[in-house]
Image (cartoon, helix red, strand yellow):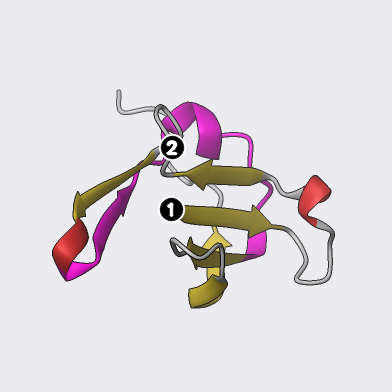
Amino acid sequence: KLYFTLKERENHPDSRAVLSKNSEAGGGITIATPTNGIGEIELTANETGGLKTGTHWFDIQLKDSLEQIYTVLAGNIVVEADITLGTS
């Protein structure tokens, strides 16, 4: 199983995550090619529209069949404010 967690601060507890996804049914992560380790994380406009501008921290974790958890990717995402609000 895969897990994606996004927080406003690295040291915030998981309960303060601003966005989280998992690969369970309807969880927002699709494991496209399990044998190659390729997964897709869907982030919708409704989910990202309310994020505060600034740096957010994320990780992607894998839980294997033995229930061991590994962080496979971690980093930050910078959320920027929209500049163009209309296209008239």
Residue 52 located left or right of residue 78: right
Residue that appears at 53% across and 75% down? 70
Q: Nearer the viewer, residue 79 or 88?
A: 79
- Residue 24 position in % (x across, y down): 43, 37
Q: Nearer the viewer, residue 71 or 65?
A: 65
Q: Residue reaching furthest top?
A: 88
| Span colored in magenta | 36-57
Residue 13 in percent (x, y) is at 84, 58
Nearest the viewer among 87 and 76 is 76
In magenta segment, residue 28? no
Q: Which amino acid is tagged 1?
A: Lys
Residue at 51 percent of width and 54 percent of height: 3
Q: Secondary structure at mark 2?
A: loop
Residue 43 vertical position relative to residue 73 in the rendered view, above or below: above
- Dot 1 alpha-carbon crowd within 10 angstroms: few under 14, some 14 to 19, many 20 or more: some
Would you say 15 lies left or right of 54 here? right
Q: Give me the residue at 50% from left, 27% from top.
A: 46
What is the quadrant of residue 42 in the picture? top left
Image coords of residue 36 (percent x, y): 16, 68
**Where, by quadrant of the figure, is residue 23 drawn?**
top left
| Residue where numbered disc 1 is placed | 1
Residue at 39 percent across and 29 percent down: it is 25
Coordinates of residue 67 in the picture (x, y in percent): 56, 62
User: Looking at the image, do the residues carrying marks 1 and 2 touch, with CB atoms under 8 Å apart?
Assistant: yes
> Residue 65's image quarter?
bottom left
The residue pinned by badge 2 equals: 24
Q: Is residue 56 magenta?
A: yes
Q: Quadrant of the C terminus?
A: top left
Exactly how many numbered labels are in the figure? Answer: 2
Q: Secondary structure at mark 1?
A: loop
